[in-house]
């Protein structure tokens, strides 16, 4: 029987990855490009449960937001792979597309880290914030499991953070993408557990 999950609340932070209109709403840029975003609403209530537990326990919450320049000059290879993103203004600064999905907005005092690549650590001050908070364990939630969540989890592991992924609090565009990503993370990079386990450990 697997060991019961324990978390030191003084050394743990919750990351919320890309809970934005672009990736969740049917009017967002990905849906307009033909990506099936419907499954990305599934983690919402589970992320909210983790957030409620973290907030009650005084555990820091960091929201990662994918945001590009208004002229999309930093879109890079992503724009070459998916050209429609440029004309759709994907996650452009100040746009509705880049805004947090309703109910996923940060609370006062919570951290927001802006990024223009999949990993929350690439070219950001996320690592500095976490080190200054003396955090060594991350609970990572959000979307999409196999893209920005997994990229952030892998980079966290490479930086020697202990990573926990509550499986219901993350989601992707197909069941296959989600399952294979969770399996890869569980194999090498994170403890993949239930939301109930995380809530109990934070409590």
Image: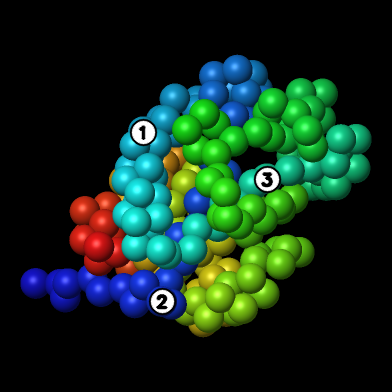
Relative horizontal placement of residue 153, taking residue 22 as reference (left or right): left
Q: Earlier in the sequence, mark 3 or mark 2?
A: 2
* Residue labelled with disc 1: 42
Relative horizontal placement of residue 135, taking residue 48 as reference (left or right): right
* Residue labelled with disc 2: 10
For the residue carrying disc 3, how many other residues have a C-alpha within 10 Å: few (<14), some (14-19), or many (20+)? many
Residue 37 percent across, percent down from the top left: 50, 27
**Secondary structure beneath disc 1?**
loop
Q: Earlier in the sequence, mark 3 or mark 1?
A: 1
The reply to whether residue 183 is visible in this rendering is no
The reply to whether residue 96 is visible in this rendering is yes
How much space separates mark 3 and mark 1, taking CA atoms? 20 Å
Q: Residue at x 47, y 33 (%)?
A: 103
Colouring scheme, one of rainbow, by chain, secondary structure, one colour: rainbow
**Secondary structure beneath disc 3?**
strand
Q: Residue at x 23, y 71 (%)?
A: 5
Q: Residue at x 45, y 60 (%)?
A: 14
* Residue labelled with disc 3: 66
User: Which mark is in front, 3 or 2?
Assistant: 2
For the residue carrying disc 2, how many other residues have a C-alpha within 10 Å: few (<14), some (14-19), or many (20+)? some
User: Disc count in the image?
Assistant: 3
Q: Quadrant of residue 58?
A: bottom left
Q: In this view of the protein, which residue sits in the foreground, 81 or 49?
A: 49
Relative horizontal placement of residue 98, taking residue 151 as reference (left or right): right
């Amino acid at each position: 029987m697997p060991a019961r999950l324990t978390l030191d609340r003084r050394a743990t932070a919750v990351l919320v990855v890309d809970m934005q209109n672009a990736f969740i709403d049917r009017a967002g840029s990905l849906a307009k490009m033909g990506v099936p975003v419907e499954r990305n609403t599934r983690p919402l209530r589970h992320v909210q449960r983790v957030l409620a537990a973290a907030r009650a326990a005084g555990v820091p919450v960091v929201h990662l937001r994918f945001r590009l320049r208004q002229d999309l000059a930093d879109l890079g290879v992503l724009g070459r792979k998916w050209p429609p993103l440029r004309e759709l203004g994907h996650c452009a600064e100040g746009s509705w597309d880049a805004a947090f999905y309703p109910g996923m907005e940060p609370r006062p005092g919570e951290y927001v880290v802006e990024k223009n690549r999949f990993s929350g650590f690439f070219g950001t001050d996320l690592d500095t914030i976490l080190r200054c908070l003396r955090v060594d364990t991350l609970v990572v939630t959000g979307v999409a499991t196999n893209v920005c969540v997994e990229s952030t989890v892998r980079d966290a592991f490479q930086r020697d953070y202990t990573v926990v992924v509550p499986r219901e609090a993350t989601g992707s565009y197909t069941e296959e993408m989600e399952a294979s990503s969770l399996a890869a993370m569980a194999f090498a990079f994170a403890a993949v557990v239930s939301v109930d386990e995380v809530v109990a450990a934070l409590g």
